[in-house]
């Protein structure tokens, strides 16, 4: 059973503001993320840049920093010659970098928390399959992939595990198995298209998987179009009875072949009011949502 913590108590008390897209902020600071390790490369090579990126979001009013472990895996590090012990140390270091930023960023003295990111299997492949799911692996194989990373991150004592950008209900099943008994609360958030997961399963069925999982303290969506977020929040609240987490991307579309974002941004801070009214308790942004937009969300939440 997951015990009550200051984070879960804050979640029960009212909306908590998440950060935005870490990769975008690192790019704004001049970091090159054109690498299969993505933000995990910075974790290995320039941890001070991570601290600076997290600090920018805290200074904008975020209460939660999501770590650079989204694409950090034992398998990915092994391809760079990093052994398991060193890789586990880097996973723990991602939590430490966010903790350092929480302690040193300017602000109003309110509590700050760290969410340890657990990205999908497809993120490790770095081939765009994180937006499709259906990897050709069963639930047991996916559980074996995710469990060691979850255990390493849990050892660093984050406030919550972010099981995020999950494209496939089967992968959600694996993650929920892997997180069982870890002693750290978790949220589960899917990447969706309309009313379905990216793999095509009905979203109501995908949400329902977490309804009775003790470790899961919030269910929702991330890295989706802002237009898809509102209906998903309402559905998650109705299906699970749990607090909802929502942090869409800017609304632009990632072109895998071109390796670039296309389209126009549709993320608007005024959407947060509807999300909260529908049951959202963790709100923020994902890719291409920067500190300025998080500051706008803070003002909207304060106005409530």
Image (spheres, rainbow, N blue to C red):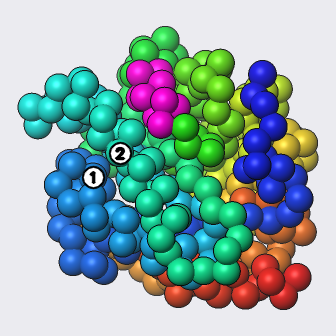
Residue 160 in sight here: yes
The magenta region covers 147-156
- The answer, for residue 199, to whether it is visible in the render is no
Q: Position of residue 36 (x, y in %)?
A: 20, 48
Front-lying residue, 127 or 181: 181
Q: Comparing marks 1 and 2, which lies closer to the viewer?
A: 2
Residue extending furthest toward the top: 140
Q: Is residue 205 left or right of residue 52?
A: right
Q: Main secondary structure of the magenta part?
A: helix
**Count of numbered marks:** 2
Of 261 and 292, nearer the camera is 292
* Residue appearing at x 76%, y 85% in the figure: 300
Q: Residue at x 76, y 42 (%)?
A: 5
Separation of residues labelled 1 and 2 (CA atoms): 8 Å
* Most foreground residue, 113 or 221: 113
If the image is split into quadrants, where does the C terminus sit?
bottom right
Q: Secondary structure at mark 1?
A: helix
Residue that numbered label 1 is attached to:
43
Q: Residue furthest left?
A: 81
The reply, left or right, for residue 94 in relation to residue 251 is: left
Q: Would you identify the image quadrant in which residue 47 lies?
A: bottom left
Neighbourhood count class around disc 2 (C-alpha, 10 Å): few under 14, some 14–19, many 20 upward: many
x and y, in percent, of residue 46 in the image: 21, 60
Say if 286 sits above or below 80 in the image.
below
Q: Residue at x 41, y 22 (%)?
A: 148
Q: Which residue is mark 2?
A: 93
Q: Is residue 113 left or right of residue 16?
A: left
């Amino acid at each position: 059973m997951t015990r009550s913590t200051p984070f879960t108590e804050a979640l029960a008390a009212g909306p908590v503001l998440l950060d935005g897209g870490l990769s975008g902020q690192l790019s704004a600071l001049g970091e090159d993320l054109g690498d299969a390790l993505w933000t995990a490369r910075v974790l290995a090579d320039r941890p001070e840049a991570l601290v600076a990126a997290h600090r920018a979001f805290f200074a904008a009013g975020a209460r939660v920093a999501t770590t650079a472990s989204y694409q950090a895996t034992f398998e990915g590090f092994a391809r760079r010659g990093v052994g398991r012990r060193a890789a586990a140390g880097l996973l723990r270091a991602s939590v430490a970098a966010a903790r350092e930023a929480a302690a040193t960023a300017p602000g109003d003295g309110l509590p700050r928390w760290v969410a340890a990111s657990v990205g999908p299997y497809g993120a490790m492949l770095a081939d765009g399959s994180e937006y499709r799911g259906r990897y050709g692996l069963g639930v047991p194989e996916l559980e074996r992939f995710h469990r060691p990373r979850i255990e390493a991150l849990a050892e660093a004592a984050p406030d919550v595990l972010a099981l995020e950008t999950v494209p496939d209900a089967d992968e959600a099943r694996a993650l929920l198995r892997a997180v069982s008994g870890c002693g750290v609360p978790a949220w589960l958030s899917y990447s969706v298209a309309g009313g379905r997961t990216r793999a095509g399963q009905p979203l109501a069925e995908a949400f329902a998987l977490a309804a009775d999982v003790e470790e899961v303290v919030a269910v929702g969506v991330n890295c989706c179009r802002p237009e898809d977020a509102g209906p998903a929040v309402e559905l998650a609240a109705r299906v699970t009875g749990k607090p909802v987490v929502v942090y869409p991307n800017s609304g632009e579309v990632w072109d895998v072949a071109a390796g670039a974002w296309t389209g126009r941004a549709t993320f608007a801070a005024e959407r947060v009011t509807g999300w909260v009214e529908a049951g959202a308790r963790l709100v923020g942004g994902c890719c291409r949502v920067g500190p300025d937009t998080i500051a706008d969300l803070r003002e909207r939440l304060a106005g409530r």
